Amino acid sequence: MRSAANAYARAAHSALSPREAESAVLIKAAQQLQAIKDDWANQADGLNRALGFNQKVWTIIAGAAAEPDSPLPAEIKRGVADLSIFVFRRMVDTMVEPSADKLGALISINQNLAAGLSARAA
């Protein structure tokens, strides 16, 4: 029984903060998109799957920022909304007319937002 409690304590201590978790998910989405971009000829079939994952991530981000009880300042909420619109439009555009070059902006946005979340978590 004691070893189970110790294992739980270790796991709880190593758990990610919400910002660290958001950062990790954005990095994962960026890595998936980067893998497609880097090997377009062989990975293009996975494009819709990677874009779908990115869409889920951004739906959660946009939804959380739009919540009435969100602690974010109004200016940040507007910024997240504007950025989300750009991301969603770019994803749809990429699905309609696939191109590796179109992934660069999505990758960069995810990486920069993840870096910002990591910095704020630290």
Image (cartoon, rainbow, N blue to C red):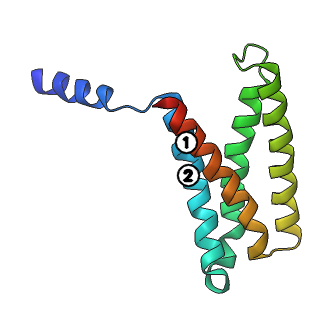
**Label 1: which secondary element:** helix
Q: Position of residue 54 (x, y in %)?
A: 68, 52
Mark number displayed over residue 72:
none
Q: Position of residue 122 (x, y in %)?
A: 45, 31
Q: Nearer the viewer, residue 44 or 114?
A: 114
Q: Nearer the viewer, residue 3 or 63?
A: 63
**Label 2: which secondary element:** helix
The type of residue carrying mark 1 is: Ser
The residue that appears at 56% across and 46% down in the rendered structure is: 25
Quarter of image, res 78: top right
Quarter of the image where the N terminus is located: top left
Q: CA distance from mark 2 to mark 1?
A: 6 Å
The residue that appears at 25% across and 26% down in the rendered structure is: 8
What residue sits right under mark 2 in the picture? 27
Q: Can residue 87 be seen at all in this image of the molecule?
A: yes
Q: Position of residue 13 (x, y in %)?
A: 30, 26
Q: Count the labels in the image.
A: 2
Question: Crowding at label 2, few (<14), some or many (≥20) Cα neighbours within 10 Å?
Answer: some
In the displayed orientation, state which residue is furthest to the bottom. Answer: 41
What residue sits right under mark 1 in the picture? 23
In the displayed orientation, state which residue is furthest to the left. Answer: 2
Q: Can residue 1 be seen at all in this image of the molecule?
A: no
Question: Crowding at label 1, few (<14), some or many (≥20) Cα neighbours within 10 Å?
Answer: many
The residue that appears at 61% across and 55% down in the rendered structure is: 29
The residue that appears at 61% across and 52% down in the rendered structure is: 111
Q: Is residue 30 above or below residue 118?
A: below
Residue 107 horizontal side relative to residue 74, left or right? left
Q: Answer whether labels 2 and 1 touch (C-beta < 8 Å).
A: yes
The type of residue carrying mark 2 is: Ile
Q: Is residue 77 above or below residue 24?
A: above
